[in-house]
Image (cartoon, rainbow, N blue to C red):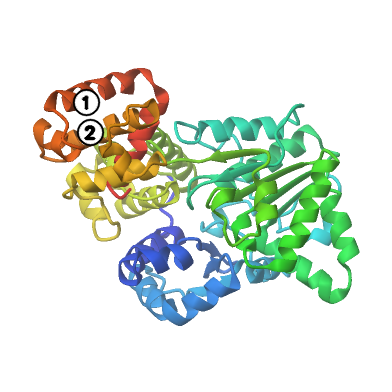
């Protein structure tokens, strides 16, 4: 029987990050810590890789000491947590100082491809892609199905494609996974194609270096000669004037020559206000596709896939009981990445007892390390604000006499949510929606119940709104 492996670095980081989120606050945490990830060096030393040097410096000043204290508490090997920017980490990897593993023990994984060096990409080879991030390992479901299908279409080199394709969504919802999967699939279908994969940070740093070395012509030839250009986290190019200028001309050149371009970002192009208007316009000119909040069935699929991977890696023979699985899917908040972290924590903590673990035992193992969602008091006003924001309306629209479908349907959804998540009566809810009669609220609740079974879009909207109410 396979021996049980030491605690995973990603499991330790999940515990550390949970505490940091509470201590730093949601704003700073989401801006600087959440986009970072833990990687493993060749000797097992953990490295916290930040997306930018600025994020590295902020964490070093404001959170590094506390992060190390928390890491020492949860890591039985008491390893030192190093902090590097993504560029530093990629440079170190290229120089052989570290191995780019995605937070798993070195002995359990085949090393992924070396990060891309723009000047050295061969016509039939991609650098920087992670081997595990393929279409086969992507779990598709409501919330990401359309993005998944569009990714497959791009990777197939099909005619009549949208260009550029722009995927957006919160951290940890699969954007980088899809970008990697496109690269692998596109290369397998056309081995002679030139495919370039870059993070926005790498695009910027390489371009700046080319400026300093007076080798911009070579840089432009390399990037603009791509048959398929993949750029991850393009929002990080915001505020960098010369890099935005170069990206604008690169994008224009590639589109004019019918080359394909795919971007990812944490927001749609229209909300990237730190990027100049003409570049935003070009980013919006093809297909803009959101990766939305995962519903319960998708979260369950992700849990099952993660358990399968851990079973192959660690030799965990049994899956948790069904009530434990449903608890993970329904009650663990956060992104897909955080959900996977919860699974890692449970597997590592339970060990061989995983299959016999009761729900109470699972909750006890997760409680100290995860911000498990708790029932909280939701107000009608909060629901109205959330629904109006979701559907692009003003809160006053929901209270108005307007009966157009674009207002009436969101109003009905809001009334249904009020009945589900507050203790207000039908008459009370009606009064809070512009003085409406209780029969109007009753009709709205019944209508939404019908639509949940017949209208996939309404079901997606209600699922997303429900998760937001739970702070998931």
- Tell me what residue is drawn at x 71 percent, y 61 percent: 244
Query: In the rendered view, does 37 fall on the left or right side of 421?
Result: right
**Percent x, y for residue 260?**
76, 40
Q: Of residues 21 and 38, which is closer to you in this image? A: 21
User: SS at mark 2?
Assistant: helix
**Percent x, y for residue 239?**
63, 67
Q: Quadrant of residue 297?
A: top left
Against 463, residue 333 (above or below) is below
Against 166, residue 61 (above or below) is below
**Percent x, y for residue 304?**
41, 36
Query: Which of the labelled discs sits on residue 205, or is there none?
Result: none
- Tell me what residue is drawn at x 22 percent, y 33 percent: 415
Q: Of residues 248 and 460, which is closer to you in this image? A: 248
Against 327, residue 280 (above or below) is below
Query: In the rendered view, does 269 fall on the left or right side of 203?
Result: left
* Residue on which the image places disc 1: 445
Specify which label sits upstream in the sequence, 2 or 1. 2
- Tell me what residue is drawn at x 89 percent, y 62 percent: 218
User: SS at mark 1?
Assistant: helix
- C-alpha distance separating marks 2 and 1: 7 Å
* Residue on which the image places disc 2: 415
């Amino acid at each position: 029987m396979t021996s049980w492996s030491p605690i995973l670095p990603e499991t330790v980081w999940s515990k550390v990050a949970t505490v940091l989120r509470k201590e730093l606050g949601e704003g700073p945490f989401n801006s600087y810590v959440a986009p970072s990830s833990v990687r493993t060096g060749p000797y097992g030393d953990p490295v916290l890789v930040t997306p930018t040097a600025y994020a590295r410096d902020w964490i070093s000043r404001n959170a590094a000491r506390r992060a190390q204290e928390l890491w020492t508490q949860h890591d039985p090997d008491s390893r030192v947590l190093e902090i590097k920017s993504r560029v530093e980490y990629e440079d170190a990897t290229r120089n052989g100082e570290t191995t780019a593993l995605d937070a798993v023990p070195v002995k359990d994984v085949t090393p992924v491809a070396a990060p891309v060096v723009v000047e050295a990409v061969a016509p039939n080879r991609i650098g920087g892609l992670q081997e595990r991030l393929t279409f086969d390992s992507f779990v598709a479901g409501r919330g990401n199905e359309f993005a998944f299908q569009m990714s497959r279409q791009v990777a197939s080199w099909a005619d009549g494609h949208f260009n550029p394709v722009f995927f957006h969504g919160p951290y940890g919802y699969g954007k980088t996974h899809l970008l990697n999967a496109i690269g692998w699939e596109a290369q397998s279908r056309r081995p002679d194609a030139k495919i370039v994969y870059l993070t926005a940070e790498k695009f910027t740093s390489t371009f700046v270096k080319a400026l300093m070395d007076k080798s911009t012509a070579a840089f432009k030839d390399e990037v603009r000669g791509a048959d398929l250009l993949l750029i991850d986290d393009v929002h990080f190019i915001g505020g960098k004037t010369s890099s935005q200028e170069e990206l604008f001309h690169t994008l224009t050149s590639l589109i004019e020559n019918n080359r394909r371009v795919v971007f990812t970002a944490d927001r749609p192009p229209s909300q990237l206000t730190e990027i100049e208007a003409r570049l935003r316009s070009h980013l919006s000119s093809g297909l803009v596709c959101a990766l939305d909040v995962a519903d319960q069935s998708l979260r369950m699929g992700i849990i099952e896939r993660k358990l399968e991977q851990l079973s192959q890696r660690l030799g965990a023979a049994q899956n948790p009981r069904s009530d434990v699985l449903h608890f993970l899917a329904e009650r663990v908040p956060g992104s897909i990445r955080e959900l996977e972290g919860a699974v890692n924590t449970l597997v590592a903590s339970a060990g061989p007892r995983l299959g016999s673990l009761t729900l109470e035992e699972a909750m006890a193992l997760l409680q100290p390390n995860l911000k498990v969602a708790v029932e909280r008091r939701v107000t009608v006003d909060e629901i109205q604000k959330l629904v109006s924001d979701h559907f692009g309306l003003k809160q006053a629209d929901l209270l108005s006499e307007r009966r157009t479908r674009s207002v009436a349907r969101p109003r009905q959804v809001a009334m249904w949510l009020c009945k589900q998540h507050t203790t207000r009566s039908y008459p009370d809810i009606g009064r809070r929606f512009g003085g409406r009669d209780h029969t109007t609220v009753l009709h709205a609740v019944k209508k939404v119940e019908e639509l949940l079974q017949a209208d996939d879009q309404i079901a997606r909207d209600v699922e997303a709104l429900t998760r937001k109410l739970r702070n998931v």
